[in-house]
Amino acid sequence: MSGPARARPRATLVTISFSHYCEKARWGLDRAGIAYVEEPHAPLVHWLGTLPRGGRSTPTLALPGAASLTDSTDILQHVESLRPGSLWPSDPTERAEVEALEARFGAELGPATRRLAYHAIFTGGESLAPLLRQSTTGISRAAATPLSWLIPPALSRALRIDAHGAELSRQRMAPILADVERRRVDGRPFLVGDRFTAADLTFAALYAPLRWPPEHPVTGRQPLPRGLERLRDEARSRPAGAFAMRLYRDERARRPFGGPALQVRDRRHR
């Protein structure tokens, strides 16, 4: 007589909990109903989770019996391999368009919103400690106060977060938002074709730091930092901002592509 069946090991998603690239990967996994355990860290100490799994940056998806995935786009493509048709259309022309948009958002929009958001928060004078305590575990949570002192100068040097960099990011983001709005001037609900794709997911996730959507599973549980109020209001006034918010409201919790009916996830920082 055979013994009880062993539970299948889950993937581990190593994150900087509030990172928009990590949210991109998290949303893709959630959308397809793929089981995973999230290991959330703070910046500067995230390597405690990534280096043992063969990565350096977040998100890193450690797969049982396979090499880790260390890029958010690779993680979305992994989702697609497990749930074909979940994030990319089958039509070759539309698929190429989605791939081009996803790549552009990742290379241009993500760095711009990250620099703008960090600059606003760091110059706003609020401590990161409450956010770190609420959204991380282990050493990140225990050391929230000293990390909140160390993170702003360290990230400012590494990412060139200053007034000049923020202005350049604003300029680089403007044509991307204009293109998103041009694509939807006829009222179409999504960026490519007639369904939600990786292009929509990537745009909404990477624009989220400036919109602070309540449906976001990490920052949506935190009050908006005062330094972000002006950027949030500017984003709110644009059609692209309203589009991103609608995607979060209507699509963030949906899994219409054959995944489990319930979201299978262990969010240890809740």
Image (tube, grey):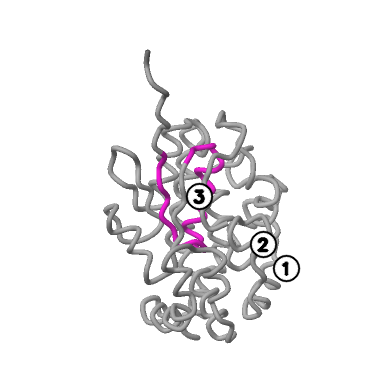
Nearer to us of marks 1 and 3 is: 3
Residue 194 occupies which quadrant of the picture?
top right
**Residue 241 disc label:** 2
Q: CA distance from mark 3 to mark 2?
A: 21 Å
Q: CA distance from mark 2 to mark 1?
A: 7 Å
Mark 2 falls on what kind of element? helix
In the depicted structure, whether residue 213 falls above or below residue 256 = below
Residue range (magenta): 10-35
Residue 17, horizontal then vertical, whole percent:
49, 61
Question: Within the magenta stretch, is there residue 132?
Answer: no
Mark 1 falls on what kind of element? loop
Say which residue appears at 62% left-offset and 51% top-offset.
183
Nearer to us of marks 3 and 2 is: 3
Mark 3 falls on what kind of element? helix
Which amino acid type corresponds to the residue marked 1 in the rendered image? Ser
Other-residue count near label 3 (Cα within 10 Å), few / some / many at <14 / 14–19 / ≥20? many
Determine whether label 2 and label 1 are within 8 Å by CB: yes
Question: In this view of the protein, which residue sits in the foreground, 120 or 101?
Answer: 120
Q: Residue under label 3, please give it.
A: 26
Q: Is residue 151 left or right of residue 187?
A: left
Other-residue count near label 1 (Cα within 10 Å), few / some / many at <14 / 14–19 / ≥20? few
Residue 212, horizontal then vertical, whole percent:
64, 65
Residue 153, horizontal then vertical, whole percent:
42, 84
Q: Residue under label 1, please give it.
A: 237
Other-residue count near label 2 (Cα within 10 Å), few / some / many at <14 / 14–19 / ≥20? many
Q: Quadrant of the C terminus?
A: bottom right
Question: In this view of the protein, which residue sits in the foreground, 128 or 250?
Answer: 128
Which amino acid type corresponds to the residue marked 3 in the rendered image? Arg
In the depicted structure, whether residue 2 falls above or below residue 265 = above
Which amino acid type corresponds to the residue marked 2 in the rendered image? Gly
